[in-house]
Image: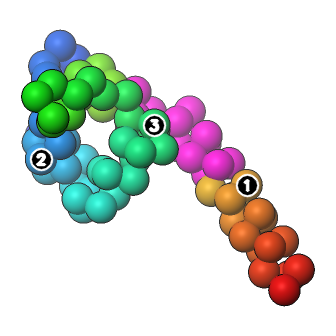
Amino acid sequence: MEEIKPMAVYTTIETQKVLRISESTIKRMLKNRLIRANKVGGQYRILGKELLRLVSPTLEKKAIHSYLDVKKKVVNKINKW
């Protein structure tokens, strides 16, 4: 894996390569604000320290909790049908 430099600025394509995730995953993460980014000229720019925050264990716990909440809501909605 490539070293993430905290003060570097990454594009979404560079972020995909560093984190080894798909384009749809990065879009979903940006949309759900799991990754903080700034839009410059219609393209997202992501700070390296944001990527480092993303790969920390505490964020993973938050993501799991969010996933389980969404899953619970979907199951409840389906059961009402």
Q: Earlier in the sequence, mark 2 or mark 3?
A: 2
The residue furthest bottom is 81
Q: Residue at x 38, y 35 (%)?
A: 35
**Residues at circles 2 and 3 in contact by the CB criterion of under 8 Å:** no
Determine which residue is flagged by label 3: 33
31 lies left or right of 49: right
Majority secondary structure in the magenta region: helix
The location of residue 70, given as percent across then percent down, is: 68, 59
Determine which residue is flagged by label 1: 69
The residue stretch that appears in magenta: 53-66
Q: Say which amino acid is labelled 1.
A: Asp
Determine which residue is flagged by label 2: 13
- The answer to whether residue 26 is seen in the rendering is yes
Q: Earlier in the sequence, mark 3 or mark 1?
A: 3
- Residues 73 and 16: in front is 73
- The answer to whether residue 18 is seen in the rendering is no
Give the mark count: 3
- Residue 23 position by quadrant: bottom left
- Residue 14 position by quadrant: top left
Instruction: Give the class, few, some or many, for how many residues have Cα within 10 Å of label 1's Cα (few <14, many ≥20).
Output: few
- Residues 51 and 76: in front is 76
Q: Residue at x 45, y 38 (%)?
A: 34
Q: Earlier in the sequence, mark 2 or mark 1?
A: 2
Helix, strand or loop under label 1: helix
Instruction: Give the class, few, some or many, for how many residues have Cα within 10 Å of label 2's Cα (few <14, many ≥20).
Output: some
* Cα separation between marks 3 and 1: 16 Å
